Image (cartoon, helix red, strand yellow):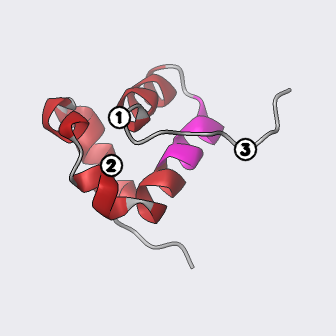
Amino acid sequence: MYTEEADISTALVFDLVYAAVKYDIKLLLDECIEHIQQNAEEVLRSEELLSASQPVLRIVIERGCKKTV
C-alpha cells in the first residue's frame, strides 16, 4: 500500500478531486483538500478553476473551505 504524501500541483488538483471521488480514493481526496486549503489563493486564481465541473467545484467549496482544527 502506498503511504507516501502526495505531491499535488494546483494545475491537477481539480482532476485529482474528480478521480478521487469517482474511484472512491479517500486518501487522495484528503490530500487534495489539504492542498486546496494550504494553497487557497493560488487554487482560486488558477485557470483550471474555470473549467472544473460543478460536482468537483461543490466538493472543493464544501470541503476545501473548511479549516481543520
Does 30 appear in magenta?
A: yes
Q: In screen coordinates, is 20 left or right of 2?
A: left
Residue at image position (32%, 55%) is 42
Amino acid type, callout 1: Phe
Q: Amino acid at mark 2?
A: Val
Say whether residue 9 is left or right of residue 54: right
Question: Residue 12, percent across and down?
Answer: 41, 31
Q: Residues within 10 Å of mark 3 (few under 14, many from 20)?
A: few
Q: Which residue is mark 1?
A: 14
* Residue at the far bottom in the pictured view: 69
Local crowd at mark 1 within 10 Å, few (<14), some, or many (≥20)? many
Residue lying farthest to the left in this orientation: 50
Q: CA distance from mark 1 to mark 3?
A: 18 Å
Question: Which amino acid type corresponds to the residue marked 3 in the rendered image?
Answer: Glu
Residue 45 picture location, percent across and down: 21, 52
The residue wearing badge 3 is 5
The stretch of residues the image draws in magenta is 25-32
Helix, strand or loop at label 2? It is helix
Give the residue number, with chain letter if any, for mark 2.
60
Q: Secondary structure at mark 1?
A: helix
Q: Earlier in the sequence, mark 1 or mark 2?
A: 1
